Amino acid sequence: MGNPKAFLTVPRKEAGYRPVHDRIHDFGEVEQTLNTRDRQEQASRCMDCGVPFCHWACPLGNKDPEWNDALYRGEWEQAYKLLKKTNPFPEFTGRICPALCEKACVLYLTTGEAVTNRENEAAITERAFLEGYVTIEHPERNGKRVAVIGSGPAGLAAAQTLNYMGYEVTVFEKNEAAGGLLRYGIPNFKLNKKIIDRRISVMEQEGVKFVYNSPLPTSPRGEEPWSIDLLYAAMEERLPLGGGWEGAPIVLATGTPTARDLNVPGRNLKGVHLALELLSQQNRVLAGMELSKDERITAKGKDVLVIGGGDTGSDCIGTAHRQGAKSVTQIEIMPKPPVGHNPATPWPNWPVILKTTSSHEEGCTRRWNINTLEFLDEKGDGHVTGVRVQPIDWKPNPDGGRPIIVEAGEPEVIKAELVLLAMGFLKPEHPEYPENVFVCGDAASGASLVVRAIASGKQAAEKVNEYLSK
């Protein structure tokens, strides 16, 4: 380590966010950046801890001490090369990863101030693009082709890894552009979509083919059993190849397309939407899509209720503010997490504690242990006007398993003209696939983190390579 004692004298310094009064009026990225001197000083805090638990915590196995040391010494190109060895898309994780590595940092345990790994990672990658360290590679081809279905983080990681192995890779994407939830789920104020376009451009120059607007059959339809021949035929229709696609390995990276719904009275009222209906539409509008007034989902001038306390709910809050919401309330059926420390999730595990995001800081009433009973239409015109909810508590289940909900207060009504359901996603159920079909990312695990999806995509690529090498 260049300066193994810097952590004793250099405090943690984050770049922070743009002022609230400024950022809520646009969809520009909220996070700021440090100057070069401060960034290298922050990298110097990575101590000679002996056992770097950041390696253990990161699904990609990022070697944070190595590239932090290179960054501290001003060797930006070397830092990027070390980072790229394990992470194919550090410009994504450097912006939106919850930084599992930081919560497993020895400094987090001892001082509560981990090394700023995530911000360092983003800074290294931006310098790499700026100064030309990101070069176009032209792998030697082995004459074999692979299809990847889905261009979210898992699909992109599988495609890039396979491409570098020498395979001819084609990515089939149902939407009009690549990125999956990176593009259509995560708001621009967290991830500018030009960052995705930049990486896709590099991948295309390196030989990866992208075929858009191509929804392909990847699950049973009605009583008809799923057939790989059906999938091959659809692929051949979208991208005809000499000799066809038959026999080519397929990587399924189709994500978790089904959101968890809330089937209570009034669910069909206008103004009640799944979270991604709002988020994906807003991102498309920012990309230039034109919608009619009736099609547009907007929080402008409305009291907004977000049901669900996770990251997707937080994204809805930030989007509602930028659309001009009158007020925003977020409710969660689970109890409020502990503040600061949770003995049930000790270091170096990810701490399940209260999280306050940049969107929460912009203004939001937050409530926990609230159950949703009914969506109300007090005007009788088919539009939601409020939601009847009830405070609840949880008691242990005598038979084990999920705790039991018990009433803890009288029902009440929360006024809302726009309700957003952000309660997570259902894990996909897959039929039995042939041995040349490989499932990865959220399609395999259920909804998870972007960094885990990237790791899963890389693992799927390794399995494809092993299969084709037999």
Image: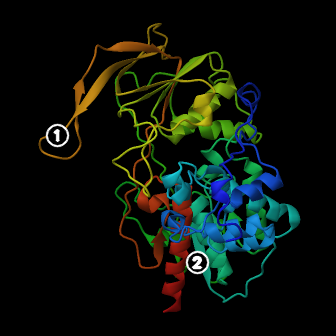
The amino acid on which the numbered mark 2 sits, given as a three-letter code, is Trp
Give SS at disc 2: loop
Amino acid type indicated by mark 1: Asn
For the residue carrying disc 2, how many other residues have a C-alpha within 10 Å: few (<14), some (14-19), or many (20+)?
many
Side (left or right) of 244 relative to 405: right
Q: Where is residue 258? Give x, y as percent.
A: 45, 46
Residue occupying the point 63% across, 68% down? 65
Number of numbered markers: 2
Q: Which mark is residue 397?
A: 1
> What residue appears at the point 73 percent right and 88 percent down from the top-left corner?
140
Residue 105 visible, this angle: no
> What residue sits right under mark 2 in the picture?
245
Which quadrant is the N terminus positioned in? Answer: bottom right
Location of residue 243 in the rendering, given as x and y in whole percent from the top left corner? 62, 84
**Image depth: mark 1 or mark 2 in front:** 1
- Judging from the image, the colouring scheme is rainbow
For disc 1, the neighbor class at 10 Å (few under 14, some 14 to 19, many from 20) is: few
Foreground pick, 367 / 27: 367
Q: Is residue 306 visible?
A: yes
Q: Position of residue 363 (x, y in %)?
A: 60, 23
Q: Secondary structure at mark 1?
A: loop
Residue extending furthest toward the top: 379
Q: Is residue 396 left or right of residue 215?
A: left
Q: Outermost residue toward the bottom?
A: 470
Vertically, is 126 above or below 25? below
Q: Residue at x 53, y 79 (%)?
A: 462
Q: Based on the displayed image, in which of its 4 quarters is residue 139 positioned?
A: bottom right
Report the front residue among 52 and 255.
52
Question: In the rendered structure, are the residues bearing label 1 and label 2 in contact, judged by CB atoms less than 8 Å apart?
Answer: no
Q: Earlier in the sequence, mark 1 or mark 2?
A: 2
Residue 285 in the image: state x and y as whole percent: 72, 37
